[in-house]
Image (cartoon, grey):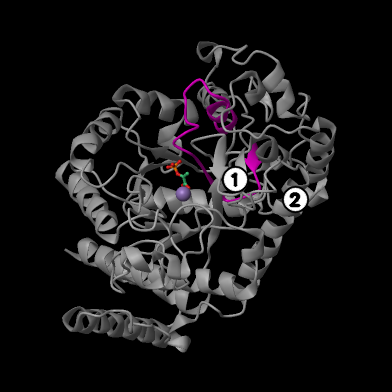
Amino acid sequence: MADDWAPGSWRAFEAKQQPKYADKAALDAVLAQVKSLPPLVCSEEVDDVRRQLAEVAEGKRFLLQGGDCAERFADCNSSLIENKLRILLQMSLVLTWGARMPTLRIGRMAGQYSKPRSADMETVEGVGLVPSFRGENVNGFDATDRAPDPQRLLAGYFHSAATLNYVRSLLDSGFSDLHRARSWELGFVKDPAQKAKYEAMTAEILSALDFMRTVGGSSLDGAEAVRRASIFSSHEGLHLDFEQALTRSADSAASIWDRAAGVAGAPAPAPEDSEPSTAAAAASSPPAATSPASRTSSPGAADAAAAAAGEPSSSSRRWYNLGAHFLWIGDRTRALDGAHIEYFRGIANPIGVKVGPSMKRAELVPLIRMLWPSPEEQPGKIVLITRLGAGRVRELLPPFIRAVQAARLPVVWTCDPMHGNTRKSSVTGLKTRDFADVVSELRDTFEVHRELGSRLGGVHFELTGEDVTECTGGPSRVAEEDLPLRYMTHCDPRLNYAQSMELAFLIASYLRS
Ligand code: PEP
Ligand code: MN
């Protein structure tokens, strides 16, 4: 492969937001163990997400991504997992009905344990200055437990595995038969006129499901959702040591059986990445030993060139991150010359990129090209997740859309109306978001795409199936004073069940109009 990418080549670049471990040997031992454990997902499933995202890019499918800002190990229990699944499935049915197309469901779950922070240290009342909480993969939320502990990565792996295991088994045993449950809790809607409208929509959705069940055999997503739905896993690809340990070589064409039997055409064992395996190497050696300009295009480019020359390509063997189906690059770690972009440009998974207000107009297309050498062959491989803030979309979004249109890149556009709208409640001092801001950013984003002949292909939310009081407003009218009542998040504020369902209905109405 005429390329210098390897699962550990990111170490020559500056890696932002990485924990500083005191005991490097302990970290190495943990990473070696993670590397020897089986992957959490398989490459065939990742390829399935890629195919579904290609449909999103073509306007034939809608994407719903949602879940916690930061999962906690303690949240790995049956009822929280069931409720998360239920809210995602119910929202997706409403969206499928609204968009008249199937929905691709991706949970922010089974691995969302590493968090970027705006400051390395914070002052906690009664304790003093302590390192910031960076997600349970790194340290504890308790202010006395903030030293990064490598053993937590193993706990992260096993909690992800337990979550995925339960999700898979629920979906396999008919949990997604929402029709049977009929547990559409519309009691949350206070406005009688709105309630009547949602009841009518629900009745229509359920009767459509009835019809599909009666005719049977339909390939429509509604019918699929009646029997057995799929939900894929995702998290922010932040902790590069850990992501590298879950990066595996796999054949995207041969079946699992071919691989196991070692039949002709199955891939040779992948060369091991021989770099030192801790971030310490990157931290202690000067970063950016390789300048961004010296980075060649990613591995896929070599394959495209080989194919054009009629030579056999190496594309059947690819590197996948098999710790999740879908990973995204956060707004704080998307620097073009940074370690995260170096890592991500070599993996075959579909990749999300957060686009915040600090992204420069001229940055977006080069960033996409760095991550995606053959866009025409892989529509939808890159998912742009805009999070610009209510009131800023009309000013900031059009130049990005125009740049992507001019470069003819078949990206998937989605909107995260959460992260641009975080504020501190003046009444309680708690971090919150107002439902009206979330709705405003979403509505503007839908409209701007329509006006420019582009298309919003999906939405990205921080939400929970629980009745929390973390975001103000919405159908249950959470007031600033109510925030402390059930404020459960250890990171950003999430939409509760009622707020999430209300949004699904709103989006369904935009999609139908
Ligand atoms: C997040 O999705 O939790 C997050 C930190 O987002 P962003 O990178 O967009 O700030
Ligand atoms: Mn968040």
Name the image quarter holding the N terminus.
top right
Q: Residues within 10 Å of mark 2 (few under 14, many from 20)?
A: some
| Magenta-span inclusion, residue 226 | no
When asked about the image quadrant of residue 400, the answer is: top left
Which residue is identified by label 2?
258
For the residue labelled by badge 1, is the local secondary structure a helix, a strand or a loop? loop
State the extent of the magenta-drawn residues as a range.
317-344
Q: Is residue 232 left or right of residue 462?
A: right
Q: Say above or below: 375 vs 142.
A: above
Q: Say above or below: 159 vs 286.
A: below
Residue 124, position as x, y percentages in the image: 56, 46
Residue 314, position as x, y percentages in the image: 64, 30
Is label 2's Cβ within 8 Å of ligand 1? no
For the residue labelled by badge 2, is the local secondary structure a helix, a strand or a loop? helix
Q: Amino acid at mark 2?
A: Asp
Q: Is residue 470 left or right of residue 82?
A: left
Q: Name the residue: 59% across, 55% down.
A: 45
User: Which corner quadrant of the figure contains ligand 1?
Assistant: top left
Which residue is identified by label 1?
133
Q: Residues within 10 Å of mark 1 (few under 14, many from 20)?
A: many
When asked about the image quadrant of residue 499, the answer is: bottom left
32 or 151: nearer the viewer: 151
Q: Amino acid at mark 1?
A: Phe
| Marker count (numbered) | 2
Q: How far apart, in angstroms, are the residues tagged by discs 1 and 2?
A: 44 Å
